[in-house]
Amino acid sequence: MSVRVVARIRPLWKSERELDVIVRPGSAVTETGKTKKGSPDSKAAALKDQDTLVRIPNPKNEGEQYTFQFNAVYGGESTQQELFDAEVAPTVKHLFNGFDVTIFAYGVTGTGKTHTMRGGKSLQERGVIPRLLSAIYRRSRKIEKDSSGASKAEVLMSYYEIYNDKVYDLFEPLEKRTHAGLPLRDNGGKTVVVGLTERPCANLKDFESLYDQANANRSTSATKLNAHSSRSHAILCVKLVTTNGDKTRVTMASAIDLAGSEDNRRTENGKERMVESASINKSLFVLAQCVEAISKKQSRIPYREAKMTRILSLGQNNGLTLMILNLASVRSYHLDTISSLNFANRTKKIEIREIENEPMFKGPARPAARTSVTGGTQRQPLRPLASSVNVNVTVNKDQAASDEKKPTKAFYVYSDKQSSKPHAISLKSEKPRRSSPLKRNSDVSSRLPSKVLRDSERLMTKETHTVQAERIEEMVERKVEQILAARAIDESSRHQAQMEQINEAVQRRLEVLERKIEGTEDARAEGLSYLLMAKQHHGRGEYSSALRMYKLALPFFPRNEKLASKISALEEKLCPKPPSPAKVQMAGRGSILSIKKPTKIARTQNVMDTSDDEYQNAEHDDSDDDYDDSHTGLKRKRVIATSKTVASNLDDRIYADENRSGEEIQSPRTAHLLSVINSRDVGQIKLLKGVGAKKAEAIVDCLCEMDSGDKEAARVRVRNLSELGRLKGVGLKTVQNMRCGVFA
Ligand SMILES: Nc1ncnc2c1ncn2[C@@H]1O[C@H](COP(=O)(O)OP(=O)(O)OP(=O)(O)O)[C@@H](O)[C@H]1O
C-alpha cells in the first residue's frame, strides 16, 4: 500500500490578499468532464467528486499551469472535523486490528502543520492528535463494553522533539535536558530513542493535561513568517496495548508535526533562528533525498543523515502512513509551494508494507512456539506457577526425620494437569543431570537421571507404586526444560547486550567517518557551488558575474583547462581587446593569473589541488557542463547547501559589479527591481524584501519630491542600484536585501 497523501490549503491570513492567490484545488471528475449531471454514473461521481487536484502556475510562465494529483485536497474552508473524519478516523480501526499508523504533516513554515496536528483549544479547532486520542478512547470503551470486560485497551504515550538534530523528551522539564540529547538505537530494524519516558494515559483528560504540559516544553519562536513557528520536529507516539484473555497486542500510532522549511531570504532570521533553520532545512532536505532515493529504487537510502529521517523511516515502516501536505495559496510562497508539491508527488508513490503486528501470548507458552529439548517431540505447554503442584510428601519415617532436620527443599514443577491427588514421592534433588533426559532409551529407568532414578527405585520397591515412572520422567524433563529455557533466555539477553555494544561502537565509528567525509567534502563542494552559480549566471546572460564566479572556482580546480578557457572567453567577451598578460599582471585585476584567492579558499587550497580530476570527470560525465548531477545525495546536498551561503556572499560582489557597470549590463534581477521602484506602486514596492508599507511609501514620496514636474518626462527614474541606495531612507543594506528577494 502506498503512502496516502492529502493536501490541505490553509485559509488566507488578514494580511494576505485574494488577488495574490495562485494555488487552487480542483476535482479530477469535473475536470475531465467524464461524468455529466444526470448520467447513470453521476451519483458515484458525486461521491468521488472530491477535490483531488492542486493547480499552480509555472513561476516562469504564468500562462502555464502545473497540476498535481493527490488522494484528496482540502481547501481553506474545510474544517478540522472534516479532515479528521475523512482521513484519520478510518485508521483507528486498523490500529485496533494490529496495524501501526503514522500520520505526519509536511509543509513550508506558516502553512498550518501545527494547526492541523495540534489545533486550537476550542472543540471545533482541535487538531488531528486530540481527535485521534478521543477516538481511541471511545473505541477502547466500546470494545470493553461489547466484550463484557474481557478485552481491554491501555494507552501509553511518549512525546519528543528533534531540535537542531538532537532528540529531547518533551515530558522532561527543559532544565533536565542534556546538551547531547537522547541517543538513538536500532532495535530489530526499528529506530528507538533510548531513555524516553513513557506515560500511561487512562483517559482523554489525562492525555490532554500531559500533552499540554509537554507542548509547553516544545521549542517555538516568532519568525517573520509565523508568530508561533515550531523550531523542531515533534513526534508523539501513542502505544496501544490491547489485551484479550491471554492475547496481548501492541500497536503504535505516531503523529508527527514536522518543522517547516524556511526560505531565509524571507524570514530575516537572526543568528539563533538561522542555526535552527539550517538544521530544519537540512533534515527536510535529507527527507527529500530519501524519498528521491526510494522512488528511484536506489540501494542506499540516506536515512542516517538526519535523526528525523532515521526516526520517520519513511518506506521502512509498516502499517498505514498518511501525509498531510500543508500549503499556503499565495504568491509569496510560490517556489516553496512547488517544491512541497514535488516532494509530496514523489512521496505518494512510496510503498509501505501493510504488516500486522503479531499478538503476544501472556501466561502459558504456546505449543507451536516451543522447541523441544529432545528435538522435535511436542511437549505440553508449561503452566504458570499458580497452577503448579508442590510435591513434598513424607514417604517414610526415616525420611520424615531427616526432613524435619533439614528445611524442605521445595521446588516448583510446572504441570499441565491439575492433580487432585497429592504425589506420593519426594524428590530430594532438584538438579537432575543435564545429560540424562536427553538420552532417550526405550527402558524407562535408563531415561531418568541417576539420582532421581535411585530415589524412584527406592520408592518403587518400598512404597506402593502410586506414581508411575512416566510421571516421574515427565516431571524431571519439565524441570530440565525449565532450567535450559532459563539458561537460553540468559544467553540471549547476554547476546543482545553484546550486540547493542557492537551496534554502539559501529554507530560511533560511522559518525566519525561521516564527520571526516563532511570535512573534506565541504571545500570541494564550495568550488563546485561557484561553478554552479557561474553556470546559472552565464545562462542568464550575466557575464560579468559569471566571470567572477568562474574565477572564484579556479583556485579549487587550478589545472582545469576548460575552466581557464571559459574564463578567457568571458574576459574576451566583456573586453574585446584584452591587454597583454604583462599589462594585466601589472594592473593586478581581471586575469586568471592574477586572481586573488579569498582567505577561506587559500586555506583549503592544498586539499583542492587533488580534486581537479574529479571536476573534469564531472564535466564530462554529465550533460550539465559544470555540475555533476550523478553525484551521491551527500555530495549534491553539500553543493546545494554551500551554494546558498556562497550565493549570499556573491550577491554583495555582483551588486558592487553592477553598480560599477551602470545600467548597460544590468542583470534581470536588478532590472526587475528598478522597474518595481520606478513603477512607484506602493503595493508592489512593499512586497520587496526588507521593505514594509512605510518604507515603500517613503520611497515613492522621495521620488515624487525629486520630480521636476507632473508630466511623465519630468519624472525622475532610478537608473541603477547606487541611485536607489541614495534615496532617502533606503541605504545600501536595504538595496541588497531588496535585490536578494527578487527572483530574476
Ligand atoms: N486551516 C486553518 N484554519 C485556520 N487557521 C489556520 C489554518 N492553518 C493555519 N492556520 C493559522 O496559520 C498560522 C500558522 O499556522 P501554523 O503555526 O500551524 O503553521 P506551521 O506550518 O506549523 O508553521 P511552522 O512550521 O513555522 O511551525 C496559525 O496562526 C494558524 O492558526
Image: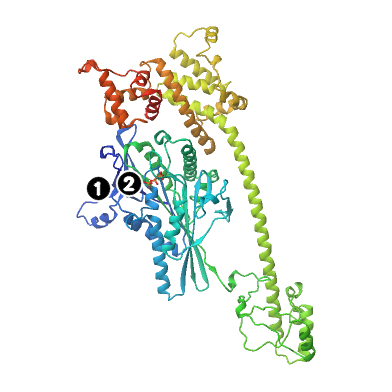
Q: Which of 698 and 459 is in front in this view?
A: 698
Q: What residue type is labelled 1?
A: Gly
- Any atom of ligand 1 within 8 Å of the CB at mark 2? yes
Residue lying at 48% horizontally and 22% vertically, measured from the top left = 549
- Is residue 279 visible in the rendered image? The answer is yes
Q: Which of 228 and 333 is in front in this view?
A: 228
Q: Which of 181 and 619 is in front in this view?
A: 181
Residue lying at 67% horizontally and 82% vertically, measured from the top left = 390
Compared to residue 491, the image places residue 335 above or below, namely: above
- Is residue 320 visible in the rendered image? The answer is no
Q: Residue 19 in the image: state x and y as whole percent.
A: 26, 37
Quarter assignment of residue 496:
bottom right
Q: Residue 175 in the image: state x and y as whole percent.
A: 53, 50
Compared to residue 569, the image places residue 616 above or below, namely: below
Please say if the residues under marks 1 and 2 sit with CB atoms less than 8 Å apart.
Answer: no
Q: Which of 17 and 73 is in front in this view?
A: 17
Quarter the N terminus occupies: bottom left
Residue lying at 39% horizontally and 53% vertically, measured from the top left = 118
Closer to the chain start, of discs 1 and 2, is 2
Q: Is mark 2 on a helix, strand or loop?
A: loop
Q: Residue furthest front?
A: 175
- Label 1 environment density (alpha carbons within 10 Å; few <14, some 14–19, many ≥20): few
Alpha carbons under labels 1 and 2: distance apart? 27 Å
Tell me the tag on residue 33.
1
Image-based side of 35 in relation to 639, left or right: left
- Label 2 environment density (alpha carbons within 10 Å; few <14, some 14–19, many ≥20): many
Compared to residue 607, the image places residue 470 above or below, namely: below
Compared to residue 40, the image places residue 138 above or below, namely: below
Tag 2 residue: 10
Q: Which amino acid does label 2 sit on?
A: Arg
